[in-house]
Image (spheres, rainbow, N blue to C red):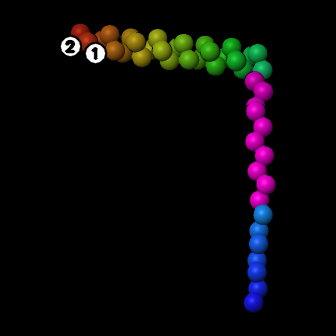
Amino acid sequence: MTLNILFFTVTIRQRKVSLDDALRNEMAREAYENMKNRALSVHRLF
């Protein structure tokens, strides 16, 4: 009789976001929101 046991250790660390990355992400989110609002306003006209 053979007993095979395999153990995994998973470590999750919080990713540190630099100031430049945070600003880029915020600008991208705002651009996405603006485009979404424009698309909705055009769609409402028809």
Which quadrant of the figure contains the C terminus? top left
Nearest the eye: 9 or 18: 9
Instruction: Report the residue at 38% width, 11% height from top.
Output: 38
Span colored in magenta: 8-17
Q: Main secondary structure of the magenta part?
A: loop
The residue positioned 75% from the left and 24% from the top of the image is 17
- List the residue tagged with mark 2: 46
Question: Badge 1: few (under 14), some or many (20 or more) residues near its Cα, within 10 Å?
Answer: few
Determine whether the residue tagged by mark 2 lies in a helix, strand or loop.
Answer: loop
Screen quadrant of the N terminus: bottom right
Residue type at the position of mark 2: Phe
Q: Quadrant of residue 15?
A: top right
Q: Is residue 40 left or right of residue 17?
A: left
- Secondary element at image label 1: helix
The image shows residue 31 at horizontal and vertical percentages of 53, 14
Please name the residue shown 32% across and 10% down the image: 41
Looking at the picture, how far across and down is residue 44, in whole percent? 26, 12
Give the amino acid type for the residue marked by disc 1 in the picture: His
Quickly name the residue at label 1: 43
Tell me if mark 2 has few (under 14), some (14-19) or many (20+) residues whose alpha carbon lies within 10 angstroms of its own: few
Query: Residue 14, located in which quarter of the rendered image?
Result: top right
Q: Examine the structure image and report whether residue 16 is included in the region drawn in magenta.
A: yes
Whether residue 6 sits left or right of residue 45 in the image: it is right
Cα distance, mark 1 to mark 2?
6 Å
